[in-house]
Image (cartoon, rainbow, N blue to C red):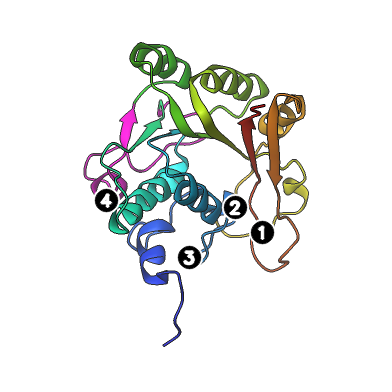
Amino acid sequence: MKTTILNHKYIEQEITSNAGKEFRYRWSHGATTKHLGDGMIIYSMMYFFKPTISVCLGSGNGFVPRIMWTCLTDLKYEGFNTDESRVILVDAVNGINGAPDWTEEDSFYRTNFNSEWLHSTTEEAYYEYFVKRDIKIDMLWIDADHTLKGVKKDFELYSEMMSDKGIIMIHDTDEKYVNNFIETKEHEDYDLSGPSEFIKTLDGDKFEILNLFNYGIEKDFPSSTGITIVRKKWI
């Protein structure tokens, strides 16, 4: 039996599927049944920085928040204190960009991953939840409204709530992906115009910016729709 640093049985059953049942949007992360795709980047960022407050704007059927929560449980197993750590998922479930499959309390996602769910738009959650509680975010995933206006608003609002060394990850930022994706049975038309246009407006004097695009590296496997990592510069 091959020895691997990854528990592929767990990945196949819990992360890239719901107990063997495929779910939507996995393809946008370049993930397959055995392969985490850009989920490995998300896990690595969580594992390295050990955030206390992680916030996920938009669910994509729970791929990202389940990785966030799994990382926290792994860190706890390794001896780190994660008792105060939280994963907060913000999703209005309003039918825009599809409907997730985890809204029922007995869904696979909600019975296996202990993230919190704010059933509201990102703007409502910002003013009614985060601002009122003066919550500082350590790790932020932006993947909700994909229009340029929507991405811009989410970034401008939530970047004000980041902790001193907070990390922001924006999904779907690779504008060339549409012309380079590998067709899969679960692929669907995807508009990347908002996120990919927004990152062009980021001020390099104020932010550290890292684009992670992998289109075309492996011709026979799906690629990620792109992640852009942003952090305020501190002099």
User: CB under 8 Å between callouts 2 and 1?
Assistant: yes
* Residue 2 in which image quadrant: bottom left
- SS at circle 4: helix
Q: Which mark is residue 110?
A: none
Left or right of 175: which side holds 221? left
Could you say which disc has been placed on residue 33 in the image? Answer: 3
Tag 2: amino acid: His
Percent position of residue 39, x then y: 52, 53
The magenta stretch spans residue 105? yes
Q: Where, quadrant-wise, is the N terminus in this rendering?
A: bottom left
Which x, y percent locates residue 211?
A: 70, 43
**The C terminus lies in quadrant:** top right
**Marks 3 and 4, how far apart at CA:** 18 Å
**Label 2 vs label 4: CA separation?**
26 Å
Query: Closer to the camera: disc 4 or disc 1?
Result: 4
Place residue 186 in its image quadrant. Answer: bottom right
Q: Are marks 1 and 3 in contact (CB under 8 Å)?
A: no
Q: Nearer the viewer, residue 94 or 220?
A: 220
Label 4 CA crowd tier, 10 Å (few <14, some 14–19, many 20+)? some
Q: CA distance from mark 2 to mark 1?
A: 6 Å
Q: Earlier in the sequence, mark 3 or mark 4?
A: 3
**Is 158 situated above or below 171?**
above
Callout 3, which amino acid?
Thr
- What span is colored magenta in the figure? 93-118
| Residue placed under numbered mark 2 in the picture | 187
Secondary structure state at the residue bearing disc 3: loop
Q: Real-space Cα distance between discs 4 and 1?
A: 30 Å
For residue 183, which numbered disc appears in the image?
A: 1
Name which of mark 4 and mark 1 comes first in the sequence.
4
